[in-house]
Image (tube, rainbow, N blue to C red):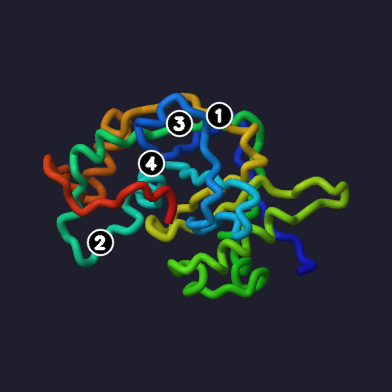
Amino acid sequence: MSRELPSFQIDAGELLQHVSRVVYRGSPLYFGRSGTNRYDDPARLYGVLYLGRDLPTALMESVFHKHQWLEDTERSIALKEVQARMVRAVGVLDHVLLADLTAPGVMAGYFGLNLEQLASRDYRHTQQVSAQVHAMRGDDGQALFDGVLYPSRNNYPAKSIALFERGGAKVSVIEDIDLADHVDWPRFVAAYRIGVEPDPGPVERDAEES
């Protein structure tokens, strides 16, 4: 792979979003090493934090990432699940440089992956991409990328961010906001036709990435 991998920069001052549970309010950002998410390190040597640039993408890649949209026309979520969630407003302190996996020709021409492999629930291929990008170094021996920008599987054509643990010093939680109090929550409910039910509905548990 001799040709240069396209990059995408997120500038200092930008605000990103991460959906979590209220029990983690006030805690440091968590870079998971479970190896169970799409761009996790397959060797579990470094952690990864998944972020969205907007609330709908962050929600669709976490709370609703296994929802059967075609089969379940109700598209409901239990009120207690909404109350258990918060949105972490994550401020960018220093520019974050991502490998742009959404650029034309990158997945096929650079990594040799097709759409099926990219969107599959089998994460072997995408985790290998994560490991390859993480290992890339410049001529000075320094790491080239802080993470990857990848196409959202559940909110296409939006883009999501998998931030490597080494980029953790470049971001910080600005505020933890209860999901129901987030300014964009009502618009999300309306646009995605979500029903908020008082009783438990068909909603996912504890998934943080798709």
Marks 4 and 3, how far apart in space?
Answer: 10 Å
Marks 1 and 2, how far apart in space?
Answer: 33 Å
Residue 165: image location, x then y, percent = 62, 42
Q: Where 105 falls versus 47 (above or below)?
A: below
Q: Quarter-wise, where is residue 68 in the image?
A: bottom left
The residue that label 3 is drawn on is 89
Residue at (63, 74) in percent of width and height: 112
The earlier-in-sequence mark between 3 and 2 is: 2
Q: Quarter-wise, where is residue 155 in the image?
A: bottom left
> Could you say which is closer to the camera, residue 76 or residue 205?
205
Q: Which mark is residue 69?
A: 2
Residue at (23, 43) in percent of width and height: 189
Secondary element under disc 4, as helix, strand or loop, is helix
Verify CB contact (< 8 Å) between mark 4 and mark 3: no
The residue that label 1 is drawn on is 172
The earlier-in-sequence mark between 4 and 1 is: 4
Q: Residues within 10 Å of mark 4 (few under 14, many from 20)?
A: many
Q: Residue furthest left?
A: 198
Residue at (69, 48) in percent of width and height: 145
The residue that label 4 is drawn on is 55
Q: Residues within 10 Å of mark 2 (few under 14, many from 20)?
A: few
